[in-house]
Image: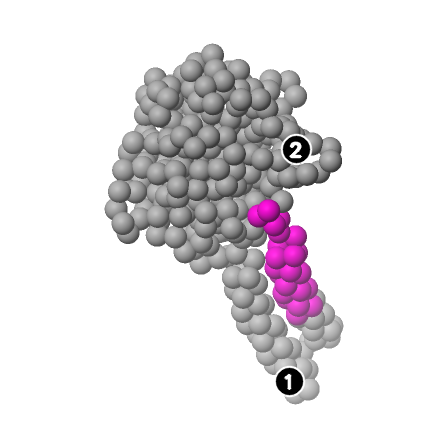
Amino acid sequence: MPSTHANSTRQTPSLAVTAKAYELIIVMPVYEDREASCQLFRELFAQYGTSVFVVAVDDGSLRHPISAEHLDEIGLPGAVIHLRRNVGHQRAIAIGLHYVAENFPNAPCTVVMDSDGEDTPATIPQLIAPLESEDVDAVVAQRKSRMETLHFKLFYVVYKLIFRLLTGRKINFGNFVALKPAAVRRLASMSELWTHLAGCVLLSKLRVRSEPIDRGRRYAGKSKMNFTGLALHGFRAVMIFAEDVLVRVGIVCSVVAALTIGAGLIATVFKIIGFATPGWFSVTLGILLIVFLQTGALTLVALMLSGVVRGGAESPQQYRNYIDQISYTKSL
């Protein structure tokens, strides 16, 4: 099947590929990671053969892009979505899920996984097994063990603590998730999917089951994620719950403001009855005034953040604007 282009006339291209039913749809973002992703393709084919359909989202790779030819060499059916520019792995996942929701609305199971080998094909059966229950819409991989550096592990612990403190929710999973068809359609209808997959799953009210799974080793190359990227990724998860954060920050700021006013009144009483030493009252009142103004500023920032998150969210129908072309394997 020839490649499908989002052409210059801006007409909506037809992205439908085939009516054939596949047992499993795999969505993965790929950025400058051809060697590792091809190794993953081989392992997927060895385990599932042609019963799996791969949706690989090439996130604007320039040095080591992938194409449908790499899938054809292995015999694995699938499509490679080439993006116009690098949009980040969370948006790449969102584009892949929108594609699945449109073209495979009734696929039995869709799995989102990273392309570097840390999410291993051997653990997919364990991940999707709980979906057989009618009370489970999505299964997330809760890591039993990690092979990252001590620096990363420490940051991850701090991130989970801050997330719990600001949102009141617990997050202990990443991109490795398995979804029923209704869950894919539900997530694809949510603008929060463009910001953070795990946060969107928590917000979706889906019936989620956690499955403890070990994390594998990267097949090749080095991770593109640095400390700045990790911090931004964590901040985006908090942004999903901007309204909850606003309420919690507002409550804390209100308590601090009330305590500040109370302390100011006590300092004034001490000044009036003569218990204040020279200069003490003015210094104390100045510090309390600064604290009071800062609590107001913090509340305002949280309010503005909530408005920015809601107002700047992507429309679910806009995902095609990011697509340069889609290449398919010859078997289609």
- How packed is label 2: few (under 14 Cα within 10 Å), some, or many (20 or more)? some
Measured as percent of width and height from the top left, residue 261 is found at: 62, 77
Is residue 303 in the magenta section? yes
Q: Which mark is residue 223?
A: none
Horizontal relation, residue 164 to residue 270: left or right: left
Looking at the rendered structure, the secondary structure element under dot 1 is helix
From the viewer's perspective, is residue 53 above or below residue 254?
Answer: above
Residue at 59%, 24% in the rendered image: 3
Q: How is the image coloured?
A: one colour
Q: Is residue 328 visible?
A: yes
Residue at 52%, 64% in the rendered image: 248
From the viewer's perspective, is residue 209 above or below residue 168?
Answer: above
Which of 106/281 is in front?
106
Q: Is residue 89 visible?
A: no
Measured as percent of width and height from the top left, residue 109 is found at: 36, 38
Measured as percent of width and height from the top left, residue 316 is found at: 57, 48
> In the rendered structure, which segment of residues is drawn in magenta?
292-317
Residue at 55%, 72% in the rendered image: 255
Q: Nearer the viewer, mark 1 or mark 2?
A: 2
Kind of residue indicated by mark 1:
Val
Give the mark nearer the N terminus: 1 vs 2.
2
Q: Which mark is residue 6?
A: 2
- How packed is label 1: few (under 14 Cα within 10 Å), some, or many (20 or more)? few
Measured as percent of width and height from the top left, residue 108 is found at: 35, 38
Kind of residue indicated by mark 2:
Ala
Which of 273/211 is in front?
211
What predominant SS class does the magenta segment belong to?
Answer: helix
Which of 326/224 is in front?
326
Q: Which mark is residue 269?
A: 1
